[in-house]
Amino acid sequence: MALSTEDIKKIAHLARIEVSDSDAAATLSKLTGILGLIEQMQAVNTDGIVPMSHSQDVVQRLRDDVVTKTNQREAFQKISPAIGNGSEARAVDGGLYLVPKVIE
Amino acid sequence: MINSSLKTLAQMLANKEISSVELTQTFLNRIDAYNPVINAYIALDHEKTLAQAKAADVRIAAGNATPLTGIPIAQKDIFCAEGWKTTCGSKMLENFIAPYDAHVITQFDHAGAVNLGKTNMDEFAMGSSNETSYFGGVKNPWDFTRVPGGSSGGSAAAVAARLCAAATGTDTGGSIRQPASLCGFTGLKPTYGVVSRYGMIAFASSLDQAGPMAKSAEDCALMMNVMAGFDERDSTSLNRDKEDYTRELYNSNPNKPLQGLRVGLPKEFFADGLDAGVATVIEDAIAEYKKLGAEIVEISLPNTGLSIPVYYVLAPAEASSNLSRYDGVRYGHRASEYTDLMDMYCKSRAEGFGAEVKRRILIGTYVLSAGYYDAYYLKAQQIRRLIAQDFEVAFKKCDVIMGPAAPSTAFKAGEKVDDPVAMYLQDIYTISTNLAGLPGMSVPAGFATSADGKPLPVGLQIIGNYFDEARMLNVAHQYQQVTDWHAQAPTLDKPEGNA
């Protein structure tokens, strides 16, 4: 199916990627080529074929409900990004990650 | 020494002919000299590396060395290594210092191997030329105007240029085998589930598999002994008995070491699209296998052509899900300016990801979106089964499958960068094994001369049945006993030359 630049912007929004109008136009031509490649699949009759997600028929393992990890919050928060908006401060405070206000 | 096998290096270390510190320093000196041009490594830390070498020397002196103790290994920058910058070739992770070790890294640490540094790669392993890396392209050591292949292009160039004793790579659609073919060395993608994906940055989880990139099949077997094995932290890791991957290498009949081996040649791998020079080299390699006792069987893998369309639904779909974790909140790139939370997500991801990664996220988002799931994702999974069944039928007639690993030799930098579909076709012979979950290798088989007169390496692909890596390694090893293609290395002193 043919996509429009409006479709590209809608998909990009679903993917949480900002695109400018000129980016959307450039992306459209590339994606149209790739989707053309993908369309070759539609010629194949797949009635009754069981979809394959993994090569080996394995089932999800279960384990005992016990603690296996130690708390490494400090180590993990050391690599938090800079807060942005002009500040170089890390986006953590009191063990919590800082994000723009979402609840009024 | 830089050309020595891992076995020889281990003997030299054991006999005190050389220390691990000396061996490691030799490679670091070469890296310092050549890496500014080749760009194979994107993170180096000589202090950390030499500390590991020192520890290895202590361990060797104490008499409890393993076959890889003290051996300097290059690690693809897709593996988290504690305290090392781990970028996956992306601006998104430009400042990411891994807080833990990938299973593969832990395995090499336990073996006493030395981490030489992290190697360049296509961004999030999405590419076949290493040109999507945020940290710049990598030069093919055989011809600096050409690409090394991808996505494991840094590891590939490091092995070919002898900037490491061996390297690790990952292969989602051909990212070990295609660069091994283009740079002229031996690489193995194991059966899906044999090497743990824990700490290996995810691209397409049902296809991603790590494997060795080295100078010979024997070296790959020694690397596999370290890398393979069950790990409960990867939900798709297979719980199987530990194997010795060298076990078949040394016990063949010397006259006809491959007597009775049935080699299947899929006619689809020799059809339109295969470079004539590459075809000649592959035919010569098959002739050599006949001399070793192999029997040639014609087979068919009728759905080969569909592997690329199927892959470009499944891999982007899985990638769009895996890469949703990069939101600028807890780690990775966060935009410096934004108005609200949604704007922070959208700008951070727009700035942090490169063009090819964004394209694949968009494709994946599209094929998974409401109303399209059955037509794309489900359909692709159904054809994936047809592709796997092709192999099942073929392996009733043969023991291993052979053909080219890539349709051409190394191409010029920039040549395919604006044409994603042309780039995707580089993986036409490798992708189907990822979809089926089968093991595949690329083995140096000779050289084809380019239009501008450069002899460029060609790789023979060997595809095996599930868990048949030990046999495949022996099939490659026996060929390497009677040919010396695998031992050839580019001359780096003259950037123009290939002598």
Image (spheres, rainbow, N blue to C red):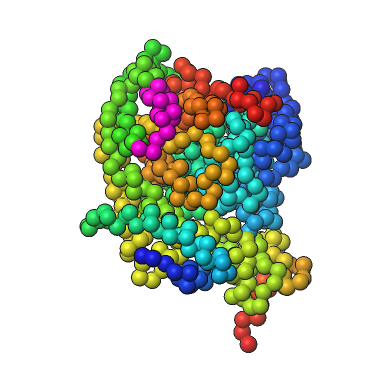
Identify the residue shown where x is 39% and y is 65%: A2
Quarter-wise, where is residue B256 in the image? Answer: top left
- Residue B96 lies, in percent from the top left, at 67, 56
Furthest residue to the bottom?
A: A104
Identify the residue shown where x is 30% and y is 45%: B303
Q: Between residues B413 and B289, which one lies in front from this camera angle?
A: B413
Any part of residue B14 in sight? no
Q: Between residues A89 and B315, which one lies in front from this camera angle?
A: B315
Any part of residue B494 in sight? yes
Quarter-wise, where is residue B49 in the image? Answer: top right
Q: Between residues B388 and A6, which one lies in front from this camera angle?
A: A6
Left or right: residue A89 versus residue B64 is: right
- Residue A18 lies, in percent from the top left, at 58, 69
Left or right: residue B218 versus residue B266 is: right
Identify the residue shown where x is 31% and y is 34%: B266
Q: Which residues are magenta?
A: B272-286
